[in-house]
């Protein structure tokens, strides 16, 4: 069953539908929530056009329940994931959609995210393989595109998943953005809504990142009136130092803030000034490369 093209929601060009402007950071969810498996988006962290891959078109599937999660209830009756449909949607984008709506915008990455935690999908390996083949077939469009997987880090605790990610990192340059939203139990539980212990997540990140570099991604926002405190940032810096001293290869830390509507409505963005202050503190305390992103752009200073 093919998924409907939902470009009527968007005032821009996609899959041959012409319009006036590109989507904002907050708009691509409409495409994803309508059951699309492939959704182009201008990404602040990718620095341009990112081709999103959604492995859960019909239901949110995640081991976390983050208060800043942007996934609203999905429409009933959407078809489940199909590797054949993913291939068809990729082909439509590469053979006509890119030229009619996105030409001139280099594809920065092919990013596995979507309506949940990608490492929970039984089809992750097939989908990665399919995207690798598409990149080789279309070097004119995807030749400079990295493979990126955004994860809440729970997959590092599963040996088979850990091995799959390591293989694609080594063989195909898969870049892994691993979530770590707190340096102490209280903030971690608030930000993840999970019963999985922070210590387990930390150990999984460390074990995996000893083998291949990863990017740590951290959400910084206000949740129900609670903002990250100086003590929270100090604990977070200490945890990053523990990881690197234990041999974890952290290529960068990405600090980002709340940018899109959420079902819970509990979150507020941090100011650019606050993000810069936290990034400066973490650079000084850890020596890591730290990038910071407001709700609309990367902060440069």
Image (cartoon, rainbow, N blue to C red):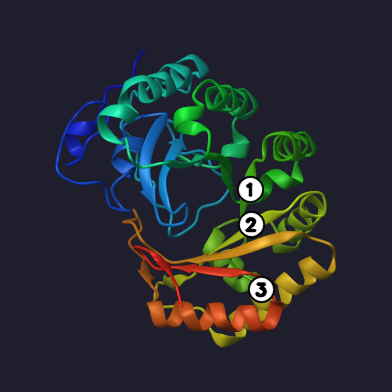
Return the disc, 2 or 1, that comes first in the chain's sequence: 1
Q: Estimate the spatial distance between the alpha carbons at disc 2 and disc 1, rounded to whole Å.
A: 6 Å
- Asked whether disc 2 touches disc 1, contact meaning CB atoms under 8 Å apart, the reply is yes
Determine the secondary structure under disc 2. strand
| Picture coordinates of residue 255, whole percent (x, y) | 52, 67
| Picture coordinates of residue 279, whole percent (x, y) | 55, 77
- Asked whether disc 2 touches disc 3, contact meaning CB atoms under 8 Å apart, the reply is no
| Picture coordinates of residue 168, whole percent (x, y) | 70, 35
Q: How many marks?
A: 3
Quadrant for the N terminus in the image: top left
Read off the residue under disc 3.
184
Q: Quadrant of residue 215?
A: bottom right
| Picture coordinates of residue 212, whole percent (x, y) | 77, 49
Q: Estimate the spatial distance between the alpha carbons at disc 2 and disc 3, rounded to whole Å.
A: 19 Å
Read off the residue under disc 2.
215
Can you tell which mark lies on residue 176? 1
- In depth, the one of 284 and 62 nearer the eye is 284
* Residue at image coords 17%, 42%: 11
Return the disc, 3 or 1, that comes first in the chain's sequence: 1
Can residue 29 be seen by looking at this rendering?
Answer: yes
- In depth, the one of 145 and 112 nearer the eye is 145
Query: On the picture, is 276 further left or further right than 14?
Result: right
280 relative to 140, above or below: below
* Residue at image coords 37%, 20%: 95
Query: On the picture, is 157 further left or further right than 116?
Result: right
């Amino acid at each position: 069953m093919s998924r409907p093209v939902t470009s009527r929601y968007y005032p821009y060009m996609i899959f041959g539908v012409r319009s006036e402007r590109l989507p904002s950071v907050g708009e691509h969810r409409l495409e994803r929530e309508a059951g699309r498996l492939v959704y182009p988006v201008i990404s602040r962290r990718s620095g341009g056009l990112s081709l999103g891959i959604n492995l859960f078109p019909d239901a949110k599937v995640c081991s976390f329940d983050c208060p800043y999660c942007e996934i609203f209830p999905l429409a009933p009756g959407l078809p489940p994931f199909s590797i054949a449909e993913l291939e068809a949607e990729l082909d439509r984008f590469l053979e006509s959609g890119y030229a009619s709506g996105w030409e001139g915008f280099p594809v920065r990455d092919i990013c596995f995210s979507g309506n949940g935690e990608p490492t929970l999908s039984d089809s992750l390996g097939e989908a990665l393989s399919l995207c690798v083949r598409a990149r080789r077939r279309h070097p004119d469009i995807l030749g400079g595109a990295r493979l990126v997987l955004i994860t809440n880090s729970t997959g590092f605790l599963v040996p088979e998943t850990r091995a799959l990610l390591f293989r694609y990192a080594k063989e195909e340059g898969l870049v892994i953005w691993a979530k770590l939203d707190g340096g102490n139990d209280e903030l971690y539980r608030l930000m993840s809504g999970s019963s999985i212990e922070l210590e387990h997540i930390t150990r999984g990140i460390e074990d995996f990142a000893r083998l291949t570099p990863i990017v740590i991604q951290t959400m910084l926002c206000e949740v129900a009136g609670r903002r990250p405190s100086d003590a929270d940032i100090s604990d977070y810096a200490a945890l990053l130092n523990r990881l690197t001293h234990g041999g974890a290869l952290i290529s960068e830390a990405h600090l980002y803030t709340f940018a899109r509507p959420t079902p819970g409505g509990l979150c507020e963005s941090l100011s650019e000034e606050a993000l810069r202050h936290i990034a400066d503190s973490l650079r000084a305390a850890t020596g890591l490369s730290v990038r910071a992103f407001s709700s609309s752009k990367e902060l440069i200073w």
